[in-house]
Image (cartoon, helix red, strand yellow):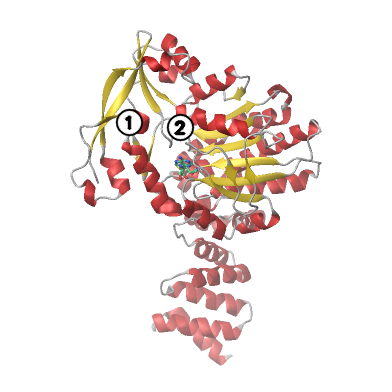
């Protein structure tokens, strides 16, 4: 690795962005193994439901304008592990079926930079059915330069001017992950914050992620009048900062603006953008800012500048929906760069219901608290929160111990609701690169609920998927399930397997005895 320690770069051209691209391209879906790159907050069923509601609203708005024949393309940028796409598509399909109203057809296109991600999605068992239905396709799309979309399965190429419906773009944890300019504003003058990089001493032997973690940027201020010239494409936004900021560093999203401009050209009707990020749309958050810290989590990220995006596109007629309250971890923004944004009533109402009134950020704040307080929760609160979270597997995994402790006092209705939740959780379960034995937790809880048929199903699934030697408890539980289901041969087989692992297992010996006597 060349260290080039003394060299200065324009911030957007610094080698950190090449490292960032290599990180994603080398790892593919493994970047999300064990949450190296966090995804829960931007990809859980609750946010998927919010997006599905807004997409349904948008399809209704198009239908209300008589636009029911041309398809709406939903393009997700940097779709990563693919979990948001799955959650959104699943909820959207359910809503459309439930509503039973005439809507335009749609196609969801998951896109990303690494080809490895596309291969991963093509093989994912939860995505394949949507591809087969013709409502999901994939594309490699480099947001920094590409001008057209090549769909992998249909072979369709979407070029500028091709789309008769607005393009619906989804971008979560995306604009914080691509390059930005770093400007400094003082006394109505713009400076480029050039960066030089101090590499860690062992850089040559470190992984890309480790280098990104340990690299130290140093900033150097250079007068940059070119941003103030009328031929700079985003001069109007820069001019706004020139006159409204003082002694402030500003991350300027030139790459994001140019990406959205290129996407805007694909349709003759503009775009609608659903995006969620650590991203500030309020000017006050940019005032008197120090240089940014590179946030490291496998890759790196910075704050997304939603303020500049909003300012730039509103000058062109867009309407931006943001919450009047402040966000804590995730700002969910909807931008309607359409000919008549006001007329898209259902979309705007859906934003009010699904983001403004109570949205993904509120849900996440509650989850952070609840993660540490399961011990004081009762069954009804656990069920209510699980339902709010779309019966997410992660919530189940975290609460399984507490649910188990509450089982002896649970009433019949609560037990039925737990079973309903388990069924819905599995319907919406999207396996991720990291292995977690959800089937084991499910099977053991159902066993405690005396649901032997279902318990057996999940415990056998856990055995089939596990790479390690089975645990004696699982084999014993399976033996009991078979016994209760009057499958004596199965009970005998699992009892024998349990005794091979632990010959002195008392309950297994008793069961063997009972079965032998017959
Ligand atoms: C922090 S991850 C977010 C993934 C996902 N959207 C989520 O919320 O979990 C950033 C994503 O942007 C993608 N990405 C980075 N640079 C890109 C570029 N130039 N063009 C397209 N995608 C890019 C990465 O491959 C990765 O999937």
On screen, residue 324 versus residue 35, left or right, reads right
Q: Which is nearer the N-term, disc 1 or disc 2?
A: 2
Q: How many residues crowd mark 2 within 10 Å: few (<14), some (14–19), many (20+)? A: many
Percent of width and height locating residue 195: 28, 28
On screen, residue 202 versus residue 304, left or right, reads left
On screen, residue 394 versus residue 75, left or right, reads left
Task: Residue lying at the far left in this picture: please name it.
Answer: 201
- Corner quadrant of residue 51: top right
Kindly identify which residue carries mark 1.
293
Percent of width and height locating residue 106: 70, 44
Q: Is residue 194 visible?
A: yes
Q: Is residue 383 visible?
A: no
Label number found at residue 278: 2
Q: Secondary structure at mark 1?
A: loop
Q: Does ligand 1 reach within 8 Å of label 2's beta carbon? A: no
**Residue at 52% across, 33% down:** 259
Percent of width and height locating residue 517: 56, 91
Residue in front for this viewpoint, 60 or 161: 161
The quadrant of the picture occupied by the C terminus is bottom right
Q: Secondary structure at mark 2?
A: loop
- Corner quadrant of residue 108: top right
Q: How many residues crowd mark 1 within 10 Å: few (<14), some (14–19), many (20+)? A: few
Percent of width and height locating residue 194: 30, 25
Above or below for 195 versus 100: above
Above or below for 515 versus 423: below
On screen, residue 396 versus residue 177, left or right, reads right
Q: CA distance from mark 1 to mark 2?
A: 13 Å
């Amino acid at each position: 690795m060349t260290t080039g320690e003394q060299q200065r770069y324009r911030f957007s051209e610094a080698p950190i962005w090449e490292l960032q691209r290599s990180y994603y391209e080398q790892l593919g879906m493994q970047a999300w193994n064990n949450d190296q790159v966090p995804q829960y907050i931007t990809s859980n069923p609750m946010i998927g439901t919010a997006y599905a509601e807004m997409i349904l609203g948008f399809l209704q708005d198009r239908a209300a304008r008589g636009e029911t024949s041309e398809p709406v393309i939903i393009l997700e940028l940097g779709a990563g592990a693919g979990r948001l796409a799955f959650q959104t598509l699943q909820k959207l399909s359910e809503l459309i079926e439930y509503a039973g109203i005439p809507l335009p057809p749609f196609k969801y296109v998951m896109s990303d930079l690494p080809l490895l991600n596309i291969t991963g999605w093509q093989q994912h068992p939860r995505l394949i059915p949507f591809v087969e239905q013709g409502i999901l396709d994939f594309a490699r799309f480099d947001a920094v330069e590409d001008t057209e979309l090549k769909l992998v399965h249909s072979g369709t190429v979407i070029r500028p001017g091709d789309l008769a419906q607005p393009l619906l773009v989804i971008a979560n944890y995306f604009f914080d992950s691509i390059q930005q300019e770093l400007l400094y504003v003082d006394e109505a003058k713009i400076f480029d914050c050039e960066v030089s990089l101090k590499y860690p001493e062992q850089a040559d032997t470190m992984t890309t992620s480790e280098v990104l973690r340990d690299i130290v940027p140093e900033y150097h201020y250079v007068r940059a009048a070119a941003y103030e010239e009328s031929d700079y494409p985003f001069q109007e936004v820069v001019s706004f900062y020139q006159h409204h900021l003082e002694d402030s560093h500003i991350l300027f999203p030139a790459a994001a603006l140019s990406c959205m401009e290129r996407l805007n050209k694909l349709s003759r009707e503009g775009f609608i953008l659903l995006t969620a990020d650590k991203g500030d749309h309020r000017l006050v958050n940019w005032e008197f800012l120090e240089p940014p810290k590179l946030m490291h989590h496998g890759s790196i990220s910075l704050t997304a500048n939603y303020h500049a995006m909003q300012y730039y596109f509103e000058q062109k007629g867009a309407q931006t929906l943001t919450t009047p309250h402040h966000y804590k971890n995730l700002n969910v923004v909807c931008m309607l760069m359409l000919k008549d944004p006001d007329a898209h009533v259902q979309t705007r109402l859906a934003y009010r219901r699904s983001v403004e009134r109570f949205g993904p950020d509120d849900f996440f704040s509650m989850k952070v608290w609840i993660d540490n307080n399961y011990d004081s929760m009762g069954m009804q609160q656990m069920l209510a929160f699980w339902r709010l979270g779309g019966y997410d597997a992660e919530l189940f995994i975290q609460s399984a111990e507490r649910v188990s402790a509450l089982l002896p006092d649970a009433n019949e209705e609560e037990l039925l609701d737990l079973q309903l939740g388990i069924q819905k959780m599995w319907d919406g379960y999207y396996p991720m690169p990291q292995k977690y034995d959800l089937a084991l937790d499910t099977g053991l809880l159902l066993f405690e609920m005396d649901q032997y048929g279902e318990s057996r199903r999940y415990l056998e699934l856990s055995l089939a998927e596990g790479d390690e030697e089975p645990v004696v408890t699982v084999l014993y539980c399976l033996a009991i399930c078979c016994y209760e289901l009057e499958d004596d041969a199965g009970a005998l087989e699992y009892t024998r397997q349990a005794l091979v692992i632990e010959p002195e297992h008392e309950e297994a010996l008793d069961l063997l005895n009972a079965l032998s006597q017959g």
